[in-house]
Image: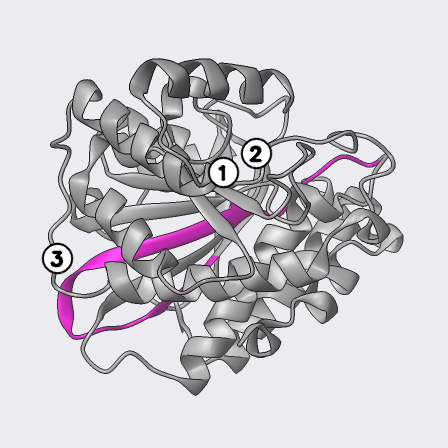
Amino acid sequence: MTSDFDVREHVTFLADPALQGRVPGSDGSRVAREYIINTFRKCGLVPLFDGKQSFTQEIHVDGEIHGVNAGGIIEGKRPGYVLVGAHYDHFSFSPGADDNAAAVAQVLAVAEHFDRHPLPNGRSILFLAFDCEEPPHFHQASMGSTFFAENCPVPLDEIQVAIILDLTGHRVPVPGLEDCLFAIGTEYATAAHDAVIEAAGGKREIRIFCTSNDRVGDMSDHHVFHLYGRPFIFLSCGRNQHYHQSTDSIENLDLPKAAAIASFLASLMATCADDREFSIDMCGRTFREKEAAGLSRLLGRQVGISEAESIIQSLRSKL
């Protein structure tokens, strides 16, 4: 199935060293953004901004333009929206293949998939490529996702769930867990947790582990959705030795795993686009039980809450 989600072409373009990291405001950023928009257009997405006239949103703070978000929409028949997004900026010293070309490629691959296999009765889906996620913009007013949420082209409270991807192109650097993908933040919304478990059913190339956001904090574009109390699902493989290094190149990606994640993402988005309602409704204790159950499935043996806590803390120290 993952052959339908080959991300190699997109990653190869976006992580080309000639783009010099897709730094906001650079020629490389402009070229990457044009590629993303052209893919949106080929997939039949409608422009998201300026009354559905533009695929771009300038990030302007205090009279200065810091970067440009790109976004499109697949218009659905049900009320509400599902958002999927990944940042496309990086640093000049690195190709940024895992951070975050692979995630953008997965978003593009899913747009292509829904162009071929439309959701007949689903919610509208917002596809976002955020600029200005990396420092010095991180958690500032100029962060692309923050600017988007504060200048949202649709009512923010009608976004049922925001699915954010970051660092989703590599094998987890922990023996026995290399094929894992972490789904973070589902402790806040039962519907989000259930959607992940449902979408993960039958996925054999990767294993999904739901863990809580307080394990890592708001380390990517899900920050603003958390801040505004919107349900979110943050998908990541964690960090590895190439994080924010010049070695973050396509040669160090696991492209079959990246394709498998794109396949899972499509299933997750289709699940979230159905008629289930998302709300912030789960307590911490309830989720700790779900987390332990998920770890039991992952390890193939029964794990209690206390042992799960110890294992997760150890895992966190290795990422």
Q: Is residue 240 above or below residue 74?
A: above
Return the residue found at the far bottom. Answer: 116
Q: Could you say which is closer to the camera, residue 165 or residue 60?
A: 165
Q: Identify which amino acid the numbered label 3 is placed on.
A: Arg
Residue that numbered label 3 is attached to? 276
Taking the image as drawn, is residue 119 in sight? yes
Residue that numbered label 2 is attached to? 133
Measuring 61% from the left and 41% from the top, which residue is drawn there? 167
Q: Identify which amino acid the numbered label 1 is placed on.
A: Gly
Question: Which dot, 2 or 3, sits closer to the camera?
Answer: 3
Residue 266 position within the rendered picture, expressed as x and y whole percent measured from the top left: 42, 66
Residue neighbourhood size for the residue with mark 1, other residues' Cα within 10 Å, grouped as few (<14), some (14–19), many (≥20):
many
Contact? badges 2 and 3 (CB < 8 Å): no
Tell me the SS state at disc 3: loop
Q: What is the CA distance from the residue labelled 3 to the residue labelled 1? A: 28 Å
Residue 34 position within the rendered picture, expressed as x and y whole percent measured from the top left: 65, 64
Measuring 26% from the left and 63% from the top, which residue is drawn there? 271
Contact? badges 1 and 2 (CB < 8 Å): yes
Q: What is the CA distance from the residue labelled 1 to the residue labelled 2? A: 6 Å
